[in-house]
C-alpha cells in the first residue's frame, strides 16, 4: 500500500472515530515517505499529490489524532515536523499542492499542544538536530499565568503565524472560519476561556452559531475564567453571585438540537470518500432520530431520506438518490447515526476499481445496464439498428457489416471502463490491413527501403545512413566495407546527366570528371 493510500485510510478511520487505527495508518504513511529509509518509493506519482505534500499531511493529520488522544508532546513534534518541510521562506511560492488552510492549521496544532503543555507545567528541555523537542515537567511556574510561560510564548508565536497566513487566504468563508478558531485559542491562552478547553473539540461541531450568544445574560466587561465555566464542572467552587442551576434561560437548554435552532435549514449536505473496501457517505446533519432516517440500497442504486423538524413540521428530504457508480454488496452495507452526522458505509463488490463518482452521471445509466446484463447473461448478440455506427464497420469490398472485436468478459478481470471492445485486436487488424496494401510508384520504393532498413543488421543500417547523408541524397549503399572507406563529400557523385553546383552556380568537381 502506498503512502497516499495509507494517508487516505487513516483519514477514513479518524472520521469513523477509530483514533488509534488512524495513528497507525498515519505512521505507515510517514515511514513510507521517509527519503532516508525508502528512496525507491519516494518518486512522485502522476495524478497524485507530491511525496513532500503527502509527508506533510501525514505528520499534520497524525498531530491532530495525537491531540484527540491528549498526547500533547507527540502532537507538538508532529506538527513541527510538518512545518519543517515548508519553511517560512517558501510558504507562498513553493508550497504547491497544499490547500491554503493547511499551513495555518499546522501552526494552530502546535499552539493547541503548547497551551496544554503550559497548562500542565511543561517546558522545553532539549532540541535535537532533526527538530524534535523533549519536554520536562516543572514543579511550579512561580505563580506565572499560562500565557506568560515558555510554552505560552510558544503558543502565542504560532497563533500569530497562523493568523498571518490565514489572512492571506482569498476565500472569505475559509478565512473567517480559521480566524474565528484562532481567536478562540488566543482567548484560552489569555485565560478568558481557561476552563472550557475540554469541551472545545466537541463544541466545534455541536455548538450553535455565534448569533445565539446575543440572547445570553449580560456579562461583565472583564470576565474572570471561573465565571465563564459551566455549572456542571467540579474543578473549583461555584461563585455565589451566579444564578442557581437549573436556569430557565434559552441559552442553557442543551437538549435543543442545532436543527431546531435553524443551524442547518433545508436539505442536508453530504460528502463521500473511499478506500479499497468501502465507499463512505457522511451526511452532515446532527441529532438525527432513527425513525427519521430511511436508507434503501440495492447492489446498483441507493436512496437516502431524512425527516427534519422545521417550523414545528416534519419535512422529508431526499439527500442521496440514483444509480451507484459501481456495484456494492447490500448485505454488508450499513448506516451509523452519530451525534454530529450520519455515516453510511457501502461495501464495494470489487475493491480494485476506484470510483470516479458516487453516482452514475451518464444520461442513460449505461454502467448499470452493462452490470445488469452481465449478471443476467442477457447480453444482446447483435447491436440494434440505432447503434450500427458505433458497433459495426462497413467494408469497401463487399458492403457488409463487420463486427468490431469484443472481449469475453467471463474470463477477464474487471476493466476500468464499461466498454467491452478489444482495442488490441482492432489495432492488430489495422496493421494487417496496412501490410496487405500494395503501394505504387515512389511510395512502393520508399516502403522497400524501409523494409530493407528494418530487417538489416547494424552495419547495413550504418552504411545506408552514411551514404545517404554524406552524398547529399545521391547515393544509397548497403555495403559497409565500401562505405566506410569512401569520402562522399570530397568524391562527389551525381546521377547521369546531372552535375554538382554551389549557390553561386559554379560547377563543383566530381568523381567522374577527367
Image: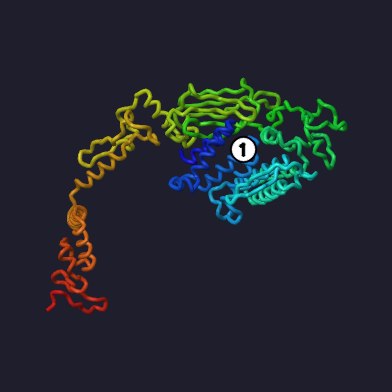
Q: Is residue 321 above or below residue 28?
A: above
Farthest residue, direction left: 514
Quarter of the image where one finds residue 195: top right
The residue nearer to you, when weighing 146 against 378, is: 146
Task: Give the crowd class for mark 1: few <14, some 14-19, many >=20 residues within 10 Å.
Answer: many
* Residue ID at (66%, 44%): 135
Farthest residue, direction top: 291
For the C terminus, which image quadrant? bottom left
Q: Is residue 54 above or below residue 341?
A: below
Residue 377, percent from left and from top: 34, 24
Q: Identify the image's colour scheme: rainbow, by chain, secondary structure or one colour.
A: rainbow
In the picture of the structure, the residue carrying the numbered disc 1 is 66
Asked if residue 176 shows in the view, the reply is no
The residue nearer to you, when weighing 195 against 71, is: 71
Q: Find numbered disc 1 in the image and state the secondary structure of the residue it sits on.
A: helix
Q: Is residue 122 left or right of residue 342?
A: right
Quarter of the image where one finds residue 71: top right
Residue 399, percent from left and from top: 23, 38
The residue nearer to you, when weighing 287 against 187, is: 187
Amino acid at each position: 500500500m502506498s503512502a497516499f493510500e495509507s494517508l487516505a485510510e487513516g483519514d477514513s478511520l479518524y472520521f469513523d472515530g477509530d483514533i488509534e487505527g488512524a495513528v497507525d495508518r498515519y505512521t505507515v504513511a510517514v515511514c513510507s515517505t521517509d527519503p532516508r529509509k525508502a528512496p525507491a518509493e519516494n518518486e512522485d506519482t502522476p495524478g497524485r499529490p507530491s511525496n513532500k505534500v503527502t509527508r506533510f499531511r501525514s505528520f499534520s493529520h497524525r498531530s491532530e489524532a495525537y491531540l484527540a488522544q491528549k498526547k500533547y508532546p507527540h502532537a507538538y513534534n508532529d506538527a513541527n515536523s510538518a512545518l519543517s518541510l515548508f519553511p517560512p521562506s517558501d510558504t507562498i511560492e513553493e508550497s504547491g499542492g497544499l490547500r491554503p488552510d493547511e499551513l495555518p492549521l499546522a501552526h494552530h496544532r502546535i499552539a493547541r499542544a503548547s497551551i496544554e503543555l503550559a497548562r500542565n507545567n511543561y517546558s522545553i528541555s532539549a532540541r535535537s538536530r532533526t527538530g524534535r523537542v523533549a519536554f520536562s515537567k516543572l514543579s511550579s511556574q512561580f505563580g506565572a499565568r499560562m500565557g506568560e510561560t515558555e510554552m505560552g510564548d510558544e503558543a502565542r508565536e504560532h497563533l500569530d503565524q497562523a493568523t498571518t497566513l490565514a489572512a492571506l487566504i482569498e476565500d472569505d468563508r475559509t478565512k473567517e472560519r480559521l480566524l474565528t478558531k484562532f481567536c478562540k485559542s488566543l482567548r484560552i491562552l489569555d485565560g478568558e476561556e481557561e476552563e472550557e478547553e475540554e469541551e472545545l473539540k466537541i463544541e466545534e461541531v455541536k455548538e450553535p452559531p455565534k448569533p445565539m450568544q446575543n440572547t445570553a445574560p449580560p456579562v461583565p466587561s472583564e470576565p474572570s475564567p471561573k465565571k465563564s465555566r459551566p455549572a456542571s464542572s467540579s474543578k473549583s467552587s461555584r461563585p455565589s453571585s451566579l444564578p442557581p442551576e437549573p436556569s430557565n434561560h434559552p441559552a442553557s437548554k442543551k437538549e435543543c438540537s442545532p436543527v431546531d435552532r435553524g443551524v442547518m435549514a433545508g436539505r442536508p449536505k453530504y460528502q463521500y470518500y473511499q478506500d479499497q473496501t468501502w465507499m463512505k457517505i457522511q451526511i452532515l446533519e446532527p441529532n438525527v432520530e432513527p425513525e427519521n432516517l430511511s436508507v434503501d440500497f440495492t447492489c446498483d442504486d441507493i436512496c437516502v431520506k431524512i425527516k427534519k423538524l422545521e417550523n414545528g413540521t416534519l419535512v422529508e428530504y431526499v439527500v442521496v438518490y440514483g444509480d451507484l457508480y459501481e456495484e456494492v454488496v447490500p448485505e454488508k452495507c450499513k448506516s451509523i447515526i452519530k451525534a454530529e452526522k450520519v455515516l453510511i458505509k457501502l461495501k464495494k463488490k470489487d475493491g480494485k476499481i476506484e470510483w470516479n463518482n458516487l453516482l452514475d452521471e451518464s444520461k442513460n445509466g449505461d454502467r448499470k445496464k452493462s452490470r445488469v446484463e452481465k449478471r443476467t447473461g442477457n447480453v444482446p448478440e447483435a447491436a440494434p439498428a440505432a447503434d450500427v455506427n458505433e458497433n459495426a464497420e462497413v467494408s469497401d469490398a463487399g458492403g457488409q457489416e463487420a463486427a468490431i472485436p469484443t472481449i469475453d468478459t467471463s474470463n477477464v478481470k474487471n476493466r476500468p471502463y464499461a466498454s467491452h471492445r478489444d482495442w488490441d485486436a482492432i489495432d492488430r487488424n489495422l496493421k494487417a490491413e496496412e501490410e496487405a496494401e500494395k503501394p505504387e510508384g515512389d511510395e512502393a520504393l520508399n516502403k522497400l527501403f524501409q523494409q530493407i532498413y528494418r530487417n538489416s543488421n547494424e552495419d547495413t543500417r550504418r552504411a545506408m545512413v552514411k551514404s545517404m547523408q554524406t552524398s547529399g541524397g545521391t547515393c544509397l549503399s548497403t555495403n559497409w566495407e565500401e562505405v566506410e572507406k569512401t569520402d562522399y563529400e570530397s568524391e562527389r557523385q551525381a546521377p547521369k546527366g546531372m552535375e554538382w553546383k554551389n549557390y553561386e552556380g559554379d560547377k563543383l568537381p566530381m568523381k567522374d570528371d577527367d
